[in-house]
Image: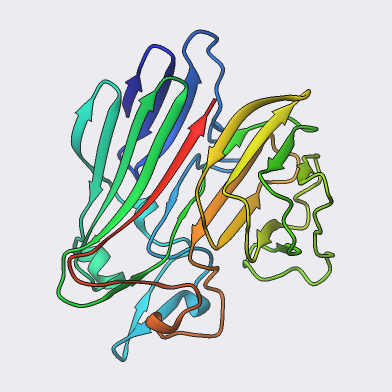
């Protein structure tokens, strides 16, 4: 575990999956991230790369060869290497190994960057294509924030497109009615709000959401312009995952990697950077 501290807020990150494990107010000791509980959800803030969501047939085809791919990709399950470290910043990197090559044939470097400034955490995920051919992937963030029932998720804008509840297989739950946001542009969290599954916005206008308790904003998350946003928790659990995705749920009937919905193509020598800030 690697800890950053600027005297105002602190961040703990583990090398396994470059996963944030703690985001704290130093003075009060208040914890803003869900503290993993294996009986409920054993992760805290996994990175989703090179897939987001469940992959159709649990694999894909590239150049006539079939490759396996776990849900949300493999980055969250491999150790990253620390390559830069200061008291207030950190860079971790993932490089292909033999196991990764069996799932993903491309040559890449994947970096996770973290920095503290005042009450703001800035983090980004960066994919760099160091190979000679075009690289295809999706990328998403999956931080789980500690919350209480009756807290509100307030969107920067009212989302005009109905969202769908999706089951554990990431397919729309046909028994659940689509969620239509009202003029308030907010969602009130309740113990059973996610009983029908995760909430998937097929498109999203907002570039920021806030968590609000008793009329006071206690967390702001800025993720910029993304094509999709997912919200998820376990029914009765006091956390909510706010998941901006570059890419789409891959549980679609298309196995060719380069033709998958929402896939990102990155030419040789290029980088794709996904920056996010969280202010507490």
Q: Quadrant of the N terminus?
A: top left
- Identified at 50% across, 85% down, the residue is 254
Q: Quadrant of residue 136?
A: bottom left
Q: Position of residue 19 (x, y in %)?
A: 40, 40
- Identified at 54% across, 25% down, the residue is 280
10 vs 188, left or right, is: left
3 vs 140, left or right, is: left
97 vs 274, left or right, is: left
Q: Is residue 28 above or below residue 87?
A: above
- Identified at 50% across, 42% down, the residue is 43
Res. 40 in view: no
Q: Is residue 216 above or below residue 44?
A: above
Q: Position of residue 171 (x, y in %)?
A: 66, 71
Q: Residue furthest bottom?
A: 64
Q: Quadrant of residue 14?
A: top left
Q: Position of residue 82 (x, y in %)?
A: 21, 38
């Amino acid at each position: 575990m690697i800890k950053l501290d600027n005297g105002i807020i602190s961040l703990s990150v583990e090398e396994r999956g470059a996963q944030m494990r703690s985001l704290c107010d130093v003075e009060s000791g208040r914890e803003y991230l869900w503290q993993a509980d294996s009986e409920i959800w054993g992760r805290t803030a996994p990175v989703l790369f090179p897939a987001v969501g469940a992959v159709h047939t649990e694999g894909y085809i590239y150049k006539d060869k079939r490759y396996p791919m776990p849900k949300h990709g493999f980055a969250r399950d491999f150790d990253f290497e620390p390559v830069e470290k200061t008291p207030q910043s950190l860079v971790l990197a993932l490089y292909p190994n033999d196991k990764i090559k069996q799932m993903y044939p491309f040559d890449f470097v994947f970096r996770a960057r973290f920095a503290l400034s005042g009450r703001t955490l800035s983090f980004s995920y960066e994919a760099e294509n160091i190979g000679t051919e075009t690289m295809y992937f999706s990328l998403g963030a999956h931080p789980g924030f500690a919350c209480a029932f009756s807290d509100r998720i307030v969107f920067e804008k009212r989302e005009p497109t109905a969202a769908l509840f999706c089951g554990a297989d990431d397919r729309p739950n046909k028994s659940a009615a689509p969620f239509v946001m009202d003029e308030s542009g907010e969602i009130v969290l309740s113990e059973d709000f996610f009983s029908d599954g995760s909430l998937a916005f097929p498109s999203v206008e907002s570039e920021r959401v806030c968590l609000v308790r008793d009329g006071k904003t206690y967390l702001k998350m800025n993720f910029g312009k993304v094509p999709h946003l997912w919200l998820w928790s376990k029914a009765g659990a006091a956390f909510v995952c706010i998941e901006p995705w570059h890419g789409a749920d891959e549980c679609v009937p298309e196995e060719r990697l380069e033709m998958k919905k929402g896939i990102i193509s990155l030419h040789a020598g290029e980088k794709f950077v996904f920056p996010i800030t969280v202010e507490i």
